[in-house]
Amino acid sequence: MDLHIDELKLSYHAKNTLHELGFTMVSDLKGHDYVSLIQKFPLKRHCVYSIIQELNGAGYLLSPDNAVSIYDVPMSKRLFHILERNYFLYLSQLSLCSKEELAGLRNLGAQTMIELEEICQAHHIELHSVHSIKENLAQYHLPFTSRHYEALYKYNIASIDDFNKITTHDLHIICQQYYYDTMKAYYILKDNGVVFQAWEDKYLFELLSGKIAQILSGKYRIDTISKLRSCSEKYVESMSSAILPSVKAVLTDK
């Protein structure tokens, strides 16, 4: 019989983190190991690491197949502590990060970076730069900074066509959950032929003009269709007459 996550003998923090990651039943964890969870949630490595020991101890996660643990690789104490402190438990995780991100880890100097690259080379792990991503997307003038390009790297997005593989919610996460940046990037990408994958909700800029979506987000703190539909009729009627017809049209469109 399948168990609910809340029925497990885990800490309150671990259960909350699992819910945050979208896991509600024990069966949802089937087939997962630490590395696969990191790949599934590339921007939430710290969340996964915070619960990994509990899940392993309780027997709910598999050991990664053929993964080389940092505990089994000869390296300097400096490099070991840097990797452990940043939740890198297996060498294969390093390929999920760009060279720029790794080089930016605290206390990772030039010599330690060379040591890390040599270890990766010895274990056939390729490290890449975000430079090519920046070059490929430069012509589209997306509202992206270095942090955005690091997120694109983690989502394996290297060209405009790769955006077809993600949802607008993924785009929102890539945009550091800044609504305006997400909306701006969305319109640019749509104008260049990108068709996003469906998800369980929709942002209002997917259904309404950018101006109205901004008003709803800024003034009323409503950014998705689910939030709009949860509003009472009285609250909707109190909205500005300039946006009310459009809001009602969205609400009546099932």
Image: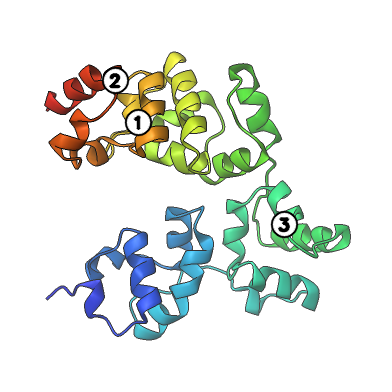
Q: Amino acid at mark 3?
A: Gln
Determine the residue positioned at 47% across, 55% down.
39
Labels in figure, total: 3
Is 51 rendered above or below residue 185? below
- Using the numbered discs, state the Cα–Cα distance from disc 3 to disc 2 in whole angstroms: 57 Å
* Residue at the spot of label 2: 243
Query: Residue 170's x, y, as percent?
Result: 42, 41
- Which secondary structure lies at badge 2? loop
Quarter of the figure with the C terminus: top left
**Dot 1 surroundings within 10 Å: few (below 14), some, or many (20 or more)?**
many
Q: How is the image coloured?
A: rainbow
Q: Earlier in the sequence, mark 3 or mark 2?
A: 3
- Which secondary structure lies at badge 3? helix
Left or right of residue 215: residue 145: right
For residue 227, what is the image quadrant?
top left
**Dot 3 surroundings within 10 Å: few (below 14), some, or many (20 or more)?**
few
Q: Is residue 40 visible?
A: yes
Query: Residue 231's x, y, as percent?
Result: 20, 40
Q: Earlier in the sequence, mark 1 or mark 3?
A: 3
- Using the numbered discs, state the Cα–Cα distance from disc 1 to disc 3 in whole angstroms: 51 Å
* Residue at the spot of label 1: 216
Mark nearer the viewer, 3 or 2: 2
* Residue at the spot of label 3: 121
- Cβ–Cβ under 8 Å for marks 1 and 3: no
Q: Is residue 156 visible?
A: no
In the rendered structure, find residue 63 and report the number of the disc placed on it.
none
- Name the foreground residue: 112 vs 190: 190
